[in-house]
Each structure stands twice: as C-alpha cells, then as structure tokens.
Image: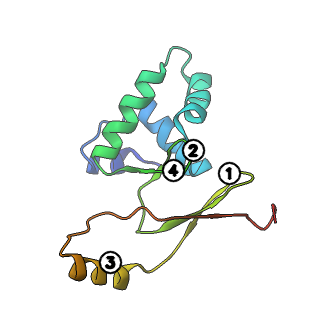
Amino acid sequence: MKNYINSLREHNLKATPQRLAIVDALYINGHMNTETLYGLMIQKFSSISLATIYKNINIMIEKNFIQEVKLPHAKSVYELTKTSHSHLLCKKCGAIEDVEINLDVMIENISKTNQFQIDKTDFVLSGNCKNCQ
C-alpha cells in the first residue's frame, strides 16, 4: 500500500485506519461506489458501518482528497483526486476509464458567452468499450 498518511494530513485529515483502508481501496481499484467500497471495508473492519463509509467519503470530498464522479443512470463512484480529467463509461459492462480531454477553450468560450464563472466540470462520455462492441 502506498503511504497516504502524509497526504491525508496535508489535506487536514486524520490518518485513521478506516481512511487509510478507503484510500488504499480507491488507489488499487480506481472508481468505486459506496456499496462496493463497504464490501471491502467490512472484510477488514467487521464492525464498520455504511454510515462510517459515507461520513469518511464526505469529509474527504470536502477536503478535496477524493472526488465524486456522477454517472448518468447509475450510482456515483469515487476516486482519488488527480489532475483534471473526464471519464468514459461503458453502457454494457459499466467499466469507467479516465480520459484526458482539454476543455479549457470550451470552458473559456462558455464563460465569456454566458458570463458564467465555471469552477467544476463533470464530463462523462458513454458508449461501449472495446470488449463490449
């Protein structure tokens, strides 16, 4: 497991065993919803509750340590915060893949045209992955 103790502390988060386990699961598995994450955590911490998972996820989102990826017609998934990127979603198997798309020009044009200050973009492209085509 990558050492995330200092990273959590840099985001003003205590490095509890539960948080370290959540971060490790997201590091290893990538995008995960709360139920899948809970399934992994209950194996390590037999008395952990789903409410504890939600509480930790919410505080880590608040501190910008992890981010929520809102998917069309599906439950949100969570990932470790990284550089700005978008997502590819397979409608058949549900696979999610990070993709680098430069949205800077589009955001700048929309901001100027609509006089709207954009501070966050959630861009998900859906279709079929190469395995499901």
Query: Is 24 situated above or below 127?
Result: above
Q: Are marks 1 and 3 in contact (CB under 8 Å)?
A: no
Q: Which residue is denoted by mark 1 in the rendering?
A: 94
Residue at mark 2 to residue at mark 3: CA–CA distance: 26 Å
Q: Which numbered dot is residue 2?
A: 4
Q: Dot 1: few (<14), some (14–19), or many (≥20) neighbours within 10 Å?
A: some
Query: Which element carries disc 3, helix, strand or loop?
Result: helix
Q: Quadrant of the C terminus?
A: bottom right
Q: Which residue is denoted by mark 3 in the rendering?
A: 107
- For marks 1 and 3, the one nearer the N-term is 1
Which of these two is toward me, 51 or 11?
51
Q: Which numbered dot is residue 74?
A: 2
- For marks 2 and 1, the one nearer the N-term is 2
- Does residue 67 appear in this view? yes
Which of these two is toward me, 127 or 8?
127
Residue at mark 4 to residue at mark 2: CA–CA distance: 30 Å
Which of these two is toward me, 133 or 95?
133
- For marks 4 and 2, the one nearer the N-term is 4
Q: Mark 4, mark 2: which one is toward the viewer?
A: 2
Looking at the image, residue 131 sits to the left or right of residue 13; the answer is: right
- For marks 4 and 3, the one nearer the N-term is 4
Q: Label 2 is placed on what type of residue? A: Ala
